Every structure is written in C-alpha cells, then in structure tokens.
Amino acid sequence: MIQEVLAVDLDGTLLHPEPEAIVVWGRTRYQYLSQSAANKLAEISQVLPVVIATARHAQTVKSLVDQLPVTNFFGFVLENGLVVKKNLNQPSVANNSFETIARLLPEWSRIEGYENCLGLIPPCSIENPKEEVEQIISNLQIQAYV
C-alpha cells in the first residue's frame, strides 16, 4: 500500500512563462520546464510515486510527459480533479451532453481536448457568459457546474 506520493501541479509550479529547455503548449501560450527541475523530478520519481495534478487535459500533459522519459509517473489527476488516469495512453471518454451545449453556442470558441469539462470562450459581446451557460444547462436539465 502506498503511503506517500508527490503530487505536483504544472502551471505556475513546474511550468513557467520564462523560456527554458522543455517546451509545453498550453491553451494560449507556451510554458516551460527547466532541465534542472526535470532532472530533480526524475530523481524523486525513483524513490517516491509522482502524480501530476492539474487543470489541464490529458493531451497537453502527455506533451510534457513524453519529454520526460526517465521520470516514472504513478498517475494523473486532470481537469481539476474530474479525470483520473493511471496512464495517459488510456482512451478519452468525452461527455456527450457537452456537445449539445456547445452546439447551442456556435459563436463561442471551443477549447478542445477535455473529457469531462466543456471549455468555451465567449464572444466579447456577451455580458454575462456564466449566466447564459447556466440557463442552457438548466433548460437541458443537465447536471453540471459552471
């Protein structure tokens, strides 16, 4: 039974905006991991299980993990805790109710790649985007949190 684990966040913890050796694309820009941080993470992973816990989805986390082949990752807590994976190669399971919501908001930009979240960026003309999405969720009788 595992009693200790190192859980690390990405953005603002391991990844920063200053250019470094390891480049990872985010939703709107690149973030970077230093080689020294990557080396330390690999070293720690030899003695303690390492878990990435992040708001990011599996695709962007995989782009980082693929660049860290000597680091042993024990698991991944993704999408603000809504998705847990032992392996990032596990197939994604998309939530179909989100497709219905997205179709009702065609002028909104969609953030792709999430399994259990719906990422949308509203047009600037929308005064209260949260209220608009909450109304759609209520009308469709979908269980969701905005």
Image (spheres, rainbow, N blue to C red):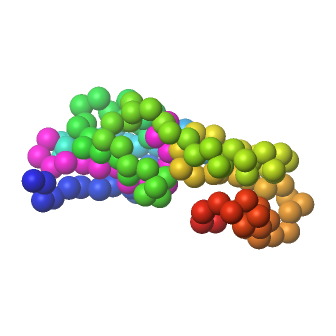
Q: Is residue 11 visible?
A: no
Q: Please tell me in which quadrant of the rendered image residue 33 appears.
A: top left
* Residue drawn at x 39%, y 30% as measured from the top left: 89
Q: Quadrant of the C terminus?
A: bottom right
Q: Is residue 104 above or below residue 21?
A: below
* Residue drawn at x 62%, y 44% as measured from the top left: 96
Q: Which residues are magenta?
A: 46-60
Q: Please tell me in which quadrant of the rendered image residue 66 appears.
A: top left
Q: Is residue 93 above or below residue 125?
A: above
All told, the count of numbered labels is 0
In the figure, is residue 17 to the left or right of 9?
Answer: right
In the figure, is residue 47 to the left or right of 141?
Answer: left
Residue 85: x percent and y percent?
36, 43
> 85 and 51: which one is in front?
85
> 49 and 139: which one is in front?
139
> Among all residues in the image, which is located at the extreme right?
125
* Residue drawn at x 29%, y 49% as measured from the top left: 51
> 68 and 111: which one is in front?
111
Residue 126: x percent and y percent?
86, 63
Residue 113: x percent and y percent?
58, 39
Q: Is residue 51 magenta?
A: yes
> 64 and 132: which one is in front?
132
* Residue drawn at x 33%, y 36% as measured from the top left: 87
Q: Is residue 133 magenta?
A: no
Residue 118: x percent and y percent?
63, 51
Q: Is residue 93 visible?
A: yes
